[in-house]
Amino acid sequence: MLSDPRVSACIVLYHATGEVLRTVRCLQNATTPVTLFVVDNSPQEPMARQIQAQCRQARIIPMKRNVGFAAANNEALKQLSSTYHLILNPDVTFEPDVIQRMVDFMDAHPDVAILTPRVFNIDGTEQFLPKRRPTIRYMASGSLAKWGEKKAAKARALDAPLRLAEETAAAARQRLEAEKRKNPRALARCLRLERQARRLGRKKQRLEERAAALTRLRAEYTLADDPPTEPMEVQFATGCFLLIRSHLFFRIGGFDPRYFLYQEDSDLSMKVMRYGKIVYHPDMHITHAWHRDSSHSFRHRMLHLVSTIRFFNKWGWKW
C-alpha cells in the first residue's frame, strides 16, 4: 500500500529498464505504507506510464530534460510531508519488512540522521561500499582495486599450471631417487623441472602480493577485511538506498544540484554529519543490480571525475 505520509520514497528514472518495476513492487509489498515519488528524467520514454499502471498511487514528476540525479531528487523534496524519506535506485530489491525495521530503528535512535543497509549483488556476494569519509587515496582505491583484481585473476590462472609443474617435478625427482645409478640426463631434466616449478611459484606469489597491496586500501575504505556485525556509525551513506529524516533533508536543502551524477551521496553524507549520525546496519539487507556505468563509458568516467573534483574543492583535498 502506498499512502501513509510517515514514509516517502523517491526513484529517479533515466533510460530505466524493467528492473524498476521490481523495485516498485518491493515498495508496494512493504509492510509499512510508503508514498512513492517517481521523477522522470526521460519523459519521452514509457517507463513512468508503466509504473503508474502498476502503482496508481505513485506520484509521477516529469522533467523537461535530464537534470541529473541530485536535482531530480530535490523535485520530490518540494512535496514531502513524511517523517522519513527513502532514497533508492531503480535497480534495488528488498524484503517486505526492511523499511519498517529501518523506521523502527530510527524511532528508537533519535540521534541517527541516516540509516543505510548492507548491500548484496544479485549473485549473493556482498557489495562492499565505502564507509569512511572519502579522501583522495580512498577515491583512487577503486581503480587500484580493479587492477588488483586483474592481478589476482592472473595468479589464480596459474594454479593449474603450477600444480602440474610441481607434480611433474616431484615425479621426476622420485624416479631419479629410485635409480641406483644416476643418469646425468635424468638429473638435468629433474633440476630443470624443479626450477620451472619454483619460477612459476614465485610468479604466482608476486602476483598475489601485488594484488593484496592494490586491494588493501579499498578494503580499508569499505571495511571489507573486518565487516561490521553490529550497527555502527559510518561517514558515508550510499545513494542506492538510504533512509533520512525528512525534516533534516529539508534543512540541508536536499542534494547539492551541482552534482549531476556521482558523489552527490558523498556530499550529502558530509552535510548530514553536522546534524546527526550516519549508521550502517548489517542486519538490514537489500540487493542492488549494480551496473558500474562509470567503468564502461567515457562520458560517465568524465562525469565521475568532474563530481570528484567538485567534492574535494568543496570539502577540502584530504589525502
Image: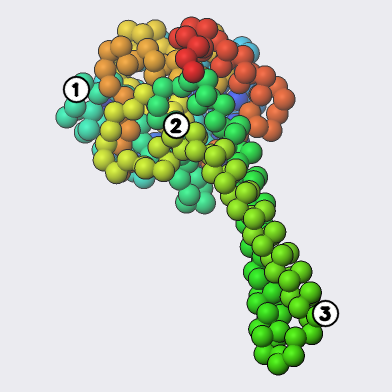
**Amino acid type, callout 3:** Arg
Residue 217 can be seen in this image: yes
Q: Earlier in the sequence, mark 1 or mark 3?
A: 1
Determine the CA span between mark 1 and mark 2.
27 Å
Secondary structure under tag 3 reads helix
Is the residue marked by circle 3 packed among few (<14), some (14-19), or many (20+) residues within 10 Å?
few
For discs 1 and 2, the disc positioned in front in the rendered view? 2
Q: What's the mark number on residue 221?
A: 2
In this view, the residue in front, 187 or 215, is 187
In this view, the residue in front, 242 or 186, is 186
For discs 1 and 3, the disc positioned in front in the rendered view? 3
List x then y, in percent, for residue 125: 48, 49
In the image: residue 313, left or right of residue 97: right
| Residue lying at the far bottom of the rendered structure | 180
- Asked if labels 3 and 2 touch by Cβ distance under 8 angstroms, the answer is no
Determine the CA span between mark 2 and mark 3.
55 Å
For label 1, the residue is: 110
For label 3, the residue is: 185
For discs 2 and 3, the disc positioned in front in the rendered view? 3
**Amino acid type, callout 1:** Pro
List x then y, in percent, for residue 306: 62, 14
Q: Quadrant of the N terminus?
A: top left
- Asked if labels 3 and 1 touch by Cβ distance under 8 angstroms, the answer is no
In this view, the residue in front, 29 or 219, is 219
Q: Quadrant of residue 172?
A: bottom right
Q: Is residue 7 above or below residue 208?
A: above
Numbered circles on residues, count: 3
| Residue lying at the far front of the rendered structure | 181
